[in-house]
Image (cartoon, rainbow, N blue to C red):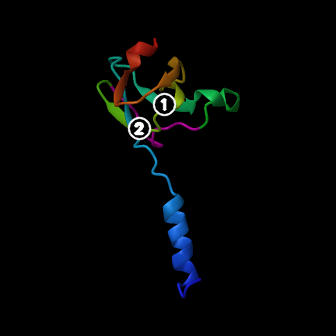
Amino acid sequence: MNGLPVAAVLAGVVVSCSTPLPPKVAVTVENDLGAAKICDVFIRQSKHVAAGWGNDWLDREEVLSDGTLRTFQMDPGLTWDVRLVYCGGQDVGVLKNLTWDHATTIQASSLR
């Protein structure tokens, strides 16, 4: 080991083998529906349809009122589905097979 501590050798291997991750892409959801409020935002990788929608991406008590924006940091180059839900439980709509390579805004009215 040439007199180097094992931790230093291992740390060198890990550092030299690591590949930097691509930067995240800012995807903003905008409620432009007037008085209607959005209580749930679901985002999943399109290839995981069988797993269902998973958890709501909004904070527990978070509500998107008219004009409210919420930005999520997404992995670029993957394909995503987005589902927005009114506070009453009815779907605003679903967008499928979206791929982002730069910052973008999804207006809720585009899901109707």
Q: Quadrant of the N terminus?
A: bottom right
* Residue at 70% over, 28% down: 50
Residue name at image x 66 percent, y 27 percent: 49
Task: Label 2, secondary structure: give it.
Answer: strand
User: Which residue lies under the disc numbered 2?
Assistant: 72
Provide the residue designation for mark 1. Answer: 41
User: Which SS does the magenta portion mostly show?
Assistant: loop
Looking at the image, residue 98 lies above or below residue 3: above
Q: Residues within 10 Å of mark 1 (few under 14, many from 20)?
A: many
Residue type pointed to by label 2: Phe
Measuring from the top left, give residue 35's x and y in whole percent.
34, 19
Q: Nearer the viewer, residue 98 or 55?
A: 98
Q: Crowding at label 2, few (<14), some or many (≥20) Cα neighbours within 10 Å?
A: some
* Nearer-N-terminus badge (1/2): 1
Whether the residues at callouts 1 and 2 have beta carbons within 8 Å, the answer is: yes
The furthest residue to the left: 67
Residue at 61% of width from left, 31% of height from top?
53
- Tell how many labels: 2
Give the extent of the magenta segment: 55-65
Residue 36 seen from this side: yes
Q: In this view, does 58 lie to the left or right of 53?
A: left
